[in-house]
Image (cartoon, rainbow, N blue to C red):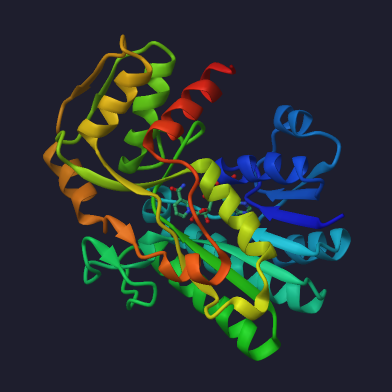
């Protein structure tokens, strides 16, 4: 039985990943600054939790020493907009936190550390349409800086100490559980969730605005898949992933196909539309496909159908 420690285990991705790995028979410990007994009960008795902070060396190292995980999936972090309003806290959780996870993994002989990186690791000099896997990363915000720094630290531990570090770079992810407070890219999730709950929703972007997204179940599965990929076939430690591009109008059309009575409107905000347009649309995932067989399973209609069913508990 694989023992897996998931940092940020009570987060959006952490919860889907926990349920997926619990079903596959893993023995799982969630390490998070928050806790949720109702989720633990839902996840079953192979799942336990330790409450602590990534920024606290004693709490990270104590948890790794006690639980002796085979794999750590490191998804705990402070995300925008909180990372930008509290940059020092983000530095401590996201950069010191990654250092703590890597160093404790080295000391306690953890087999493998899997890291959740982001499209936000690229900066304004990245191509708008398709970003090559190894394109230079020049982010301008603390969150992006923390993601690049974590990737490079992981590569350093791999080079210097032979720690088996692997990372995926996600585009914006959508699915049930994406918080409304998690930034302007959350509209793709909120439009579907509100419609599934029978409530109206106004998208704050122009209908023709395209955005690249990945469905949450594909995102969670990618972490499980890269964790079991054959090391000999990996040519990189960090791999970009791609889902699909959807305009706000196409998203509305897909929602209407599932729920013809849905009330989705557009109330474009110039600043929000400009921000969404400034994010690269897609990351080139051809290396991930070639090296470890990555392939998303959900297209737009499948994802909307699954999202609606999950929201309604059907
Ligand atoms: N959601 C996305 O669209 C997206 C896109 C790209 C990358 N990512 C990355 O995926 C990972 C998971 O993101 P998510 O969407 O699940 O975010 P989330 O905010 O839902 O989950 C993050 C979790 O980390 C925990 N956390 C924060 N600070 C902590 C600390 N100091 N110590 C311990 N735990 C702490 C939070 O309590 C939370 O449960 C993050 O590393 C994020 O950067 C997410």
Image quarter where the C terminus lies is top right
- In this view of the protein, can residue 96 be seen by the observer? no
Image quarter where the N terminus lies is bottom right
When the figure is inspected, residue 300 is found, relative to residue 75, above or below; the finding is above
Residue drawn at x 54%, y 72% as measured from the top left: 291
Q: Residue furthest toward the left?
A: 270
Residue 72 in picture, x, y percent from top left: 71, 62
In this image, 113 relative to 211: left or right?
right
Residue drawn at x 80%, y 49% as measured from the top left: 26
Q: Nearer the viewer, residue 43 or 243?
A: 243
Residue 187 in picture, x, y percent from top left: 32, 34
In this image, 246 relative to 103: left or right?
left
Residue drawn at x 20%, y 55% as measured from the top left: 278
When the figure is inspected, residue 35 is found, relative to residue 99, above or below; the finding is above
Residue 296 in picture, x, y percent from top left: 48, 50
- In this view of the protein, can residue 149 be seen by the observer? yes
Q: Nearer the viewer, residue 107 or 87?
A: 107
Q: Which of 139 and 193 is in front in this view?
A: 193
Count of numbered tags: 0
Residue drawn at x 21%, y 62% as measured from the top left: 128
When the figure is inspected, residue 31 is found, relative to residue 16, above or below; the finding is below
Residue 232 falls in image quadrant: bottom right
Residue 138 falls in image quadrant: bottom left
Residue 204 in picture, x, y percent from top left: 21, 32
When the figure is inspected, residue 61 is found, relative to residue 236, above or below; the finding is above
């Amino acid at each position: 039985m694989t023992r897996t420690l998931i940092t940020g285990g009570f987060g959006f991705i952490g919860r889907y990943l926990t349920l997926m790995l619990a079903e596959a028979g893993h023995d799982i410990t969630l390490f998070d600054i928050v806790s949720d007994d109702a989720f633990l009960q839902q996840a079953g008795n192979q799942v336990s939790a330790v409450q602590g902070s990534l920024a606290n060396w004693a709490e990270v190292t104590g948890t790794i020493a006690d639980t002796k995980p085979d794999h750590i999936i490191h998804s705990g972090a402070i995300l925008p907009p909180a990372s930008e309003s509290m940059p020092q806290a983000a530095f401590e959780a996201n950069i010191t936190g990654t250092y703590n996870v890597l160093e404790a993994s080295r000391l306690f002989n953890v087999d493998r550390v899997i890291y959740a990186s982001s499209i936000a690791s690229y900066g304004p000099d990245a191509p708008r349409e398709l970003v090559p896997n190894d394109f230079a990363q020049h982010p301008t915000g603390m969150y992006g800086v923390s993601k690049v720094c974590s990737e490079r630290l992981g590569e350093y531990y791999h080079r210097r100490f032979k720690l088996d570090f692997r990372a995926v770079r996600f585009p914006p992810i959508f699915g049930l559980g994406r918080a409304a407070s998690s930034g302007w890219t959350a509209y793709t999730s909120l439009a579907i969730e509100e419609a599934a709950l029978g409530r109206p929703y106004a998208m704050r972007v122009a209908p023709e605005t395209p955005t690249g997204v990945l469905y949450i179940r594909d995102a969670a599965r990618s972490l499980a898949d890269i964790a079991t990929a054959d090391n000999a076939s990996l040519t990189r430690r960090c791999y970009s992933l791609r889902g699909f591009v959807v305009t706000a109008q196409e998203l509305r059309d897909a929602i209407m196909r599932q729920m013809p009575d849905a009330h989705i409107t557009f109330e474009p905000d110039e600043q929000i539309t400009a921000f969404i347009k400034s994010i690269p649309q897609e990351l080139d995932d051809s290396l991930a496909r070639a090296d470890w067989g990555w392939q998303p399973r959900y297209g737009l209609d499948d994802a909307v159908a699954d999202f609606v069913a999950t929201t309604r508990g059907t």
